[in-house]
Image (cartoon, helix red, strand yellow):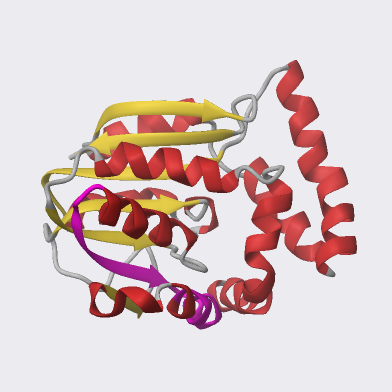
């Protein structure tokens, strides 16, 4: 199953950013900007951070650009099991040179030492984990005491308005994605992964159970998108 998921993301890597733009009505970049501000405001002026399920590197780019503007010197380690995604990320982040390390790895078993990072981010990737709870445990392991964990994600939800949003995601989005990006399967997978993931409330309980304390929370898209910050 893991190899199948990796092959899937390898195949959609060149069009993954387009997938996100369509899924989010074009405002996913703004969500990353909001999350980046939340995380960077809690980091010291020199910080080592991890960007997990880095994908094409869009979240990492936001963090590095904002860090430059705000005088924060970042060393960033990007982890992803998909070599295709990492190749796109490598091109995107090339200008930061040795500030960035990219590694092939799974979130449930991160290829790094414990308690070495001031911050960890994961943007729209946790619901793709085979074992999200173990992924959160690994994030706890690699963070220093007092370190911060930022997650941006599409969450399962309830309610009348939310049903309309999910209807777009599950029916119209695969049709539109198939027409514009030539990959209906990718957009169908997105809808299925959201439907099978946690609600925000369930996720908060899990993260607190692992040992994190909630710091800040923002919700968008009628609760479908959560931007959550936690502290170890």
Q: Residue at x 54, y 31 (%)?
A: 199
Determine if the magenta segment contains residue 82. Answer: yes
Name the outermost residue toward the front.
69
* Quadrant the C terminus occupies: top left
- Quarter of the rendering occupied by the N terminus: bottom right
Q: Horizontal placement of 177 versus 103: left or right?
A: right
* Relative image position of residue 9 (x, y in whole percent): 61, 72
Residue 182: x %, y % from top left: 84, 70
Q: Is residue 205 among the parts visible in the rendering?
A: yes
Q: Residue at x 39, y 79 (%)?
A: 94
Given residues 188 and 196, the one toward you in this image is: 188
| Whole-percent x, y for residue 177 in the image | 82, 58
Quarter of the figure with residue 10: bottom right
Q: Which residues are magenta?
A: 70-89
Question: Was residue 139 drawn as part of the magenta stretch in this picture?
Answer: no
In the image, residue 44 sits, relative to residue 229, either above or below, namely below
């Amino acid at each position: 199953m893991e190899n199948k998921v990796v092959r899937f993301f390898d195949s959609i890597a060149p069009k993954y950013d387009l997938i996100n733009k369509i899924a989010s009505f074009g405002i996913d970049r703004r969500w990353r900007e909001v999350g980046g501000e939340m995380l960077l405001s809690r980091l010291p002026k020199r910080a080592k951070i991890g960007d997990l399920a880095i994908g094409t590197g869009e979240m990492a780019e936001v963090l590095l650009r904002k860090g430059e503007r705000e005088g924060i010197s970042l060393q960033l380690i990007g982890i992803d099991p998909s070599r295709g995604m990492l190749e796109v990320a490598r091109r995107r982040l090339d200008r930061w040179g040795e500030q960035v390390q990219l590694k092939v790895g799974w979130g449930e078993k991160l290829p790094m030492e414990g308690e070495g990072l001031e911050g960890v981010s994961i943007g729209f990737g946790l619901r793709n984990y085979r074992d999200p709870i173990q992924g959160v445990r690994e994030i706890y392991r690699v963070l220093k005491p007092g370190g911060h964990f930022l997650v941006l994600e599409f969450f399962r939800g309830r309610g009348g308005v939310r049903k309309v949003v999910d209807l777009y995601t599950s029916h119209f989005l695969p049709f539109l994605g198939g027409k514009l990006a030539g990959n209906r399967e990718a957009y169908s997978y997105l809808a299925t992964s959201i439907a099978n993931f946690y609600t925000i409330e369930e996720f908060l309980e899990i993260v607190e159970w692992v040992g994190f304390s909630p710091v800040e929370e923002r919700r968008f898209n009628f609760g479908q998108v959560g931007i959550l910050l936690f502290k170890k």
